[in-house]
Amino acid sequence: MKINRVINGKQVEIKLTENEIAFIQACTLDYSYEEIATVLKKSVNTIYGYRDRVFRKLQVKQRTAMVVAALQQNYIDL
């Protein structure tokens, strides 16, 4: 999925992978990172990687802000 953001005055297209979107959706269920890893059948380190990439792409620093940004950009529905 793609969205456009303005970064440093430039329009930039941001893409989230299916795994990153699944990670965000799992965060809406208040799962711990270990539980998300189990549900998505990934290692905890992979989940941390998803978290870091999504935070960077959405320019957020907390899970709550990530979920709000994902909702605003129509990546996920509740």
Image (cartoon, grey):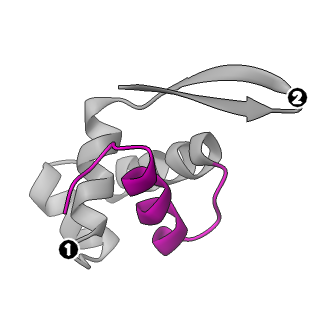
Pointer 2 or 1: first along the chain: 2
What amino acid type is highlighted by mark number 2?
Answer: Gly
In the picture of the structure, the residue carrying the numbered disc 2 is: 9
Which quarter of the figure has residue 26?
Answer: bottom left
- Label 2 element class: loop
Q: CA distance from mark 2 to mark 1?
A: 35 Å
Q: State which region is magenta.
A: 59-78
Left or right: 41 as drawn, with respect to 73? left
Query: As displayed, is residue 30 above or below residue 11?
Result: below
The picture places residue 55, in percent across and down from the top left corner, at 57, 52
The picture places residue 11, in percent across and down from the top left corner, at 73, 21
The picture places residue 25, in percent across and down from the top left corner, at 24, 57
In the picture of the structure, the residue carrying the numbered disc 1 is: 29
Residue 77 lies in the magenta stretch: yes
Front: mark 2 or 1? 2
Q: Tell me the crowding category of disc 2: few under 14, some 14 to 19, or many 20 or more residues within 10 angstroms, Cα based.
A: few
